[in-house]
Amino acid sequence: GASGLLMQPTENDLAHPRLRPHLDRYMRGRGIDADRKSRLFRLAWELTGDAFGQRQHLYEYVHRGDLARNRINLYKRYDQSSVRERLERLIDEPAPPAAPQEVSP
């Protein structure tokens, strides 16, 4: 969207009789008219650039909790029984005898 997010006409601009022909000519997109493009870009701005979008991002960033603690909690909650079982079997079973090595003279 580049600068299009910042430079969209308002509904009043789109309704202005002298301004509208210029908007139709210069603000339209490929396969989208000036009205729809303007509304689409204003919605994108609401979600990414305005105070609401920024507050939402900041809230999620700050209030999701301590990242290190969340990782530790996730690790602790993960079912490790199958891995532990395999490790216990590996430790309990004797290692197979090593193959005799040839000694060179």
Image: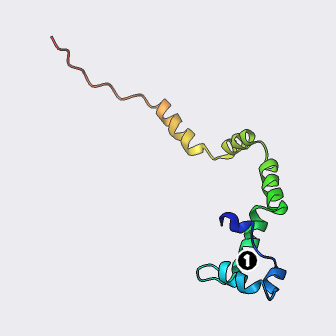
Is residue 42 placed above or below 75 in the rendered structure?
below
Residue 34's spot in the image, x, y percent?
Answer: 70, 82
Q: Residue at x 79, y 61 (%)?
A: 53
Q: How many neighbours does mark 1 have within 10 angstroms: few (below 14), some (14-19), or many (20 or more)? A: many
For disc 1, the marked residue is: 38
Q: Residue at x 63, y 47 (%)?
A: 79
Q: Quadrant of the N terminus?
A: bottom right
Is residue 96 placed above or below 13 in the rendered structure?
above
Residue 20's spot in the image, x, y percent?
Answer: 75, 85
Residue at the outermost top position: 105
Q: How is the image coloured?
A: rainbow
Residue at the outermost front position: 18
Residue 94's spot in the image, x, y percent?
Answer: 42, 28
Quadrant of the rendered image containing residue 15: bottom right
* Amino acid type, label 1: Ser
The residue lying toward the viewer, choosing from 79 and 96, is 79
Left or right: residue 79 versus residue 35 is left
The residue lying toward the viewer, choosing from 21 and 56, is 21
